[in-house]
Image (spheres, grey):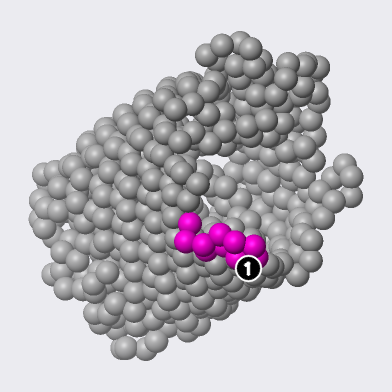
Amino acid sequence: MCAAPTLLPIPPLLFPAALLALAASSHGARGQTPVGLFEADRAHLPLGGAGVLALPGEVDLFFQQIDPIPVTRVDERDAVVPSDGAAFVRLRLSPALTLVDPGAGVINLWRLLAEVDLLRDWWFVGDGREPLAADPRARSETGLVGQRLSQLHLTAAGSHLAVQLGLTRSRWGLGLVSNAGDDPAPHTADSPFGIAFQGDHVVRLGVSAHPLGRGLATPPLTVALAFDGVIDDDTARWQDGDRAYQLVAAVSGQTEALRLGFYAAHRFQAHAEGGDTNVTVLDLTGRVRLAHEEGLSVFLEAELATIRGRTSLTQSVMSDTSFDVDQLGALARMAIESGPFLGVLEVGAASADNHPFDDEQRAFAMDRDHRVGLLLFREVLMAGAAVTVDNIADPDYRGTPPRGSERLATSGAVRGAIYANPRASFRLAEGLHLYAGFLYAASDGEYVDAFWSGLVGGAPRGPNNGPPATELGWEVDLGIAWRFSTEPLTWRLRLEGAWCSPGEVFDDEQGRAAPDVGGVWLQAGMLW
């Protein structure tokens, strides 16, 4: 029998509470080029008066080499996902036209922004990864990924009002459920490791009001409403036939030492495979500064989200009706910065579904672009979940796989797990950073593999048909990043390595432990 696939979270894709985080100097005297609206060291063209055409671009080459990962297939108990050598190239242009007229009244800033990847191409991928084809991020084949228009939207803003219309990325809070897929940086509270993929994309009509003013800088109070048509996120892709829409309402506020935000988003989705999803997302996020003095800064930030509603996408052998969705996820970070040192302790939790045969779906998954480590979630668990989908699709197991079973693929997201991820970064010189991290993770309750557990009537079994367990494992990550300029270009180099020891969850049916997995990543790029 087959366990009911769990539902991935619904990214609410909120209209940004602070709009663009613009510099207050945009309100300068008439006739000045706006500043704070573009990166001054990137390609741009002043248009006279208070206008600027920014023409930034970047090209990056990524390479990665990952050790073989043992998996258990229904027709091959000692299968191995072979060593993966892969290269990826990306050419991105992000033009933006900005006009500012401080004396124009309610709306005094207009901004048209686009972002397009002209080249997104896997050069080569290791052979033998076909069983991972269920997961679009598992690099099962090489070839052109294709051009992608990620943003094309118009923003009109003033001190008390902002309106946004068009295709855009979206991020709320710490990126737990809505994540823009920003490139990692070595000296921030976000994880510096890994490759940014694509973020969540919607066509949005959004309006935000700033009753106390300062809408072009740091408004103390923001109220926002938005309507989204989802183009691509964790659970929907317009190109594949999914139709998902979202209504979002949010309020956020900030003082010098405290930021708080809350939103509610209702999502209704017709899945391409059949079935509907209607859920509500409630999310609370905040950041408090605990210390701020010369040479020392300490802050705490957190996000808590719950998803509730019903879905009829997934099916199981036990029930063909809709399922209740009741999921909970949380993320918290404490950061200390002193001189060249930055230390971050991040902990996260995502509820699991330990009873896959009932009519409730409790498994919460963090957004796929929330990076946690390099190997455990983004490679080892991703491979295991993709093979689970492949096993379920085996015609000898069940003639036709149940609807929604492909949603078991994780795309490297944290799902049904609890983790701790301390990290540290050291600024060795201007533009040169050394950073390190340690990750330990366990499942929220005994790990349940939908295929192997289904074969034994629902009792918990691991991805390699091992006995019930909760320990997912640990990994050590290390990286070095260097960014330097040779006008008119800026260059960036990153080298990262990781070593992962899978936990008891990955033991096989004889109780043998899975071998350790190592990996190396290299990025070389230039910006203008």
How packed mark 1 is, by other alpha carbons closer than 10 Å (few <14, some 14-19, many 20 or more), is some
Question: Would you name the residue on which mark 1 appears?
Answer: 338
Identity, as a three-letter code, of the amino acid under mark 1: Ser
Residue 110 image point, x, y percent: 61, 19
Left or right: residue 359 compared with residue 392: left
Report if residue 401 is visible in the image. Answer: no
Q: Which residue shows up at 34% across the image and 82% down it? A: 504
**As rendered, which of 188 and 415 lies closer to the eye?**
188
**Residue 116 against residue 294 in the figure, above or below:** above
* Residue closest to the far top: 104
Q: Which residue shows up at 59% across the image and 58% down it? A: 188
Point out the image quarter for the N terminus: bottom left
Residue 45 image point, x, y percent: 81, 26
Q: Which residue shows up at 79% across the image and 61% down it? A: 430
**As rendered, which of 380 and 73 lies closer to the eye?**
380
Report if residue 478 is visible in the image. Answer: yes
Q: Bounds of the magenta span?
A: 289-298
User: How many circles with numbers are drawn on the protein?
Assistant: 1
Q: Is residue 293 magenta?
A: yes
Left or right: residue 436 compared with residue 255: right
**Residue 222 against residue 197 in the figure, above or below:** above
Quarter where residue 235 is shown: top left
Residue 129 image point, x, y percent: 51, 63
* Residue closest to the far front: 293
**Residue 466 against residue 270 in the figure, above or below:** below
Q: Main secondary structure of the magenta part?
A: strand
Residue 226 image point, x, y percent: 38, 27
